[in-house]
Image (cartoon, helix red, strand yellow):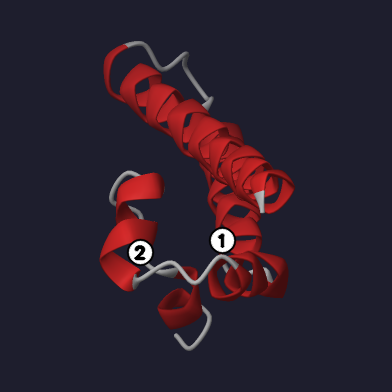
Amino acid sequence: MQAKLQELKTRLMEINDLDSANALLSWINKFNMPPGGAAARGRQMATLAQLSHEKLVDAAIGKLLDDLRLTKPASRTIRRGQPDPRHAAQL
C-alpha cells in the first residue's frame, strides 16, 4: 500500500512540476518576452500542457487511485486541487 501511495505522489509531483514550469513561462511571457519569441514560447507552453495532460489521464494514475480506494475528495486533496484524472480522461 505504501509503495502505491508513493508512486501516486511521485506521478502527481511530476504533473505539478510541469504545470509550475508552464506557469513560469506564462509569467515571463507577460513581463519579459524577448522580441520575436512568442512563437517559440507558445510552442514550449503547449508542449508542457500536453505532457501534463497526458500524465494526468494516464490509466496508471486511475488504477492507483482505485487500488488505494481513495474517495474523490481524498484524491483531490492529494493532487492539490487538480481535476480527477478519471474525469479528465473522459474529456
User: How far across and how far down the image is residue 37, in percent?
Assistant: 53, 25
User: How far across and how far down the image is residue 63, in percent?
Assistant: 65, 74
Can residue 43 be seen in the rendering of this structure?
no
Residues tagged 2 and 1 counted as in contact (Cβ below 8 A): yes
Can residue 54 be seen in the rendering of this structure?
yes
Q: Is residue 77 left or right of residue 58?
A: left
Q: Residue at x 41, y 81 (%)?
A: 87
Mark 2 or mark 1: which comes first in sequence?
1
In the rendered structure, which amino acid carries the disc numbered 2? Pro
Q: CA distance from mark 2 to mark 1?
A: 9 Å
The residue that label 1 is drawn on is: 56
Q: Quadrant of the C terminus?
A: bottom left
In the rendered structure, which amino acid carries the disc numbered 1? Leu
For residue 83, the mark is 2
Secondary structure under tag 1 reads helix
Q: Residue at x 55, y 31 (%)?
A: 17
Of 49 and 62, nearer the camera is: 62
